[in-house]
Image (cartoon, rainbow, N blue to C red):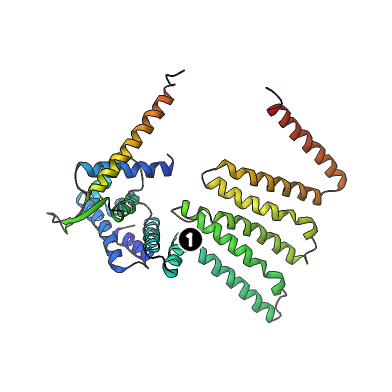
Amino acid sequence: MNIQFKKGVLELCVLALLSRKNYYGYELVNEISKTISIAEGTIYPLLRRLKNDGYVTTYLQESLEGPPRKYYKLTNEGEEMKNELLKEWQTFASRVNTLLEGGDDE
Amino acid sequence: MNKHEFLKIMNHYLRGIPETEIEDILYDFKEYFNAGVQDGRSEEELAHSLGDPKAIATQIKAEYMVKLAKSTPNFRNMWNAILAAMGLKFFKVIGLTLMIVGISLFLNQLNLYSLSWGQIWPIFLLGAGIAFEVSFFTNPMRGKANISLLIPGGILTTIGILFQVLALTDYLFIIKLWPIFLLAIAIGLFQFYFFGGKNIWFMLPIVLLGSSGGIFLVKNLVSANVFGYFLAVLFIAIGSIVWFNFGRK
């Protein structure tokens, strides 16, 4: 699949997952890589960018095994961003589907 | 590769950004390894799923530098951002070029061989061109940030080769080879077009420069008689393309 395209979709997937619950890195990465095949390490630069842009925040939480885990949490801006991207994606996907199915206006 | 090696490589390629920032970045990766091992996976397997530590670190560093340059745009920060976007390979090639020139001049000075400054200076053009090319093609985060490097890359590499050939042959062939200047610009633009999203409007200057450079080059390199045939075939070809594509309707 086209790399740029994948990256755009990846951002939406991360935001969508985080809007359901807070994840720690490994858990989030695992969840994503179930669906999208990608070098898992590339999700971390994306998470940093989202954090720098104020779409997510992090907090540490004690875990039973080993050192505290860094959880990622969506901010209000992140939630807005997610809705915007989701809308774009849905419009785009439905148009592509119409096109692939042959269209109904001719 | 195990956890330790992975983190060491990342740490190495993150150098240059503040220590606290590096620790924060590596925290995520340490956590990834710890959680993965508890999940029953081996460190090697985990490192493999993460991908290339160098690519990840380079990307994070470049983004940090660009962010810094945007928020505090002084000369130093902008320079660092450019360096991070170009990658280290650029400076490796420049360094190598300088060493080759230095050694060459040294040997000349010792009368061990006779390539003078006048004969080797074009290697700087060539070196700079190759450095731009290499820094684009070896950068794990190829993209908008550095795609423009391909324009100077293509132009300087082509002109560098041209001048190197000319300098070694006392500039005898410049009368014949000058159309390569036109081709050099076409090559630079074509690379930008080809790797940069294929904006079709770039094809206009590329085709104009490329075809005029090509025609003059052929004219200069073959005899007048052969060129006569070449022109004849060329006009027939263009004429028939125009006829069949635009003549109808």
Total marks in image: 1
Kindly indicate the quadrant of the structure image that contains residue A99.
Answer: top left
Q: Is residue B56 left or right of residue B185?
A: left
Residue at x-position 25% and y-position 44%: A79
Residue at x-position 25% and y-position 60%: B27
Disc 1 residue type (three-letter):
Met
Quadrant of the image containing the N terminus of chain A: top left
Residue lying at the far left of the rendered structure: A64
Q: Is residue A55 visible?
A: yes
Q: Is residue B138 left or right of residue B163?
A: left
Kindly indicate the quadrant of the structure image that contains residue B173.
Answer: bottom right
Q: Between residues B247 and A23, which one lies in front from this camera angle?
A: B247
Q: Is residue B123 above or below residue B49?
A: below
Kindly indicate the quadrant of the structure image that contains residue B74.
Answer: bottom left
Q: Between residues B222 and B198, which one lies in front from this camera angle?
A: B198
Q: Between residues A1 and B175, which one lies in front from this camera angle?
A: B175
Q: Is residue B35 above or below residue B125?
A: above
Residue B124: percent from the left, percent from the top? 62, 67
Residue at x-position 20% and y-position 41%: A20
Q: Residues within 10 Å of mark 1 (few under 14, many from 20)?
A: many
**Secondary structure state at the residue bearing disc 1:** helix
Residue lying at the far right of the rendered structure: B225
Residue B245: percent from the left, percent from the top? 68, 28
Residue A96: percent from the left, percent from the top? 41, 29
Q: Is residue B40 visible?
A: no
Subunit of label 1? B
Q: Is residue A47 left or right of residue B135?
A: left
Residue where numbered disc 1 is placed: B86
Q: Between residues B194 and B110, which one lies in front from this camera angle?
A: B194
Residue B114: percent from the left, percent from the top? 73, 75
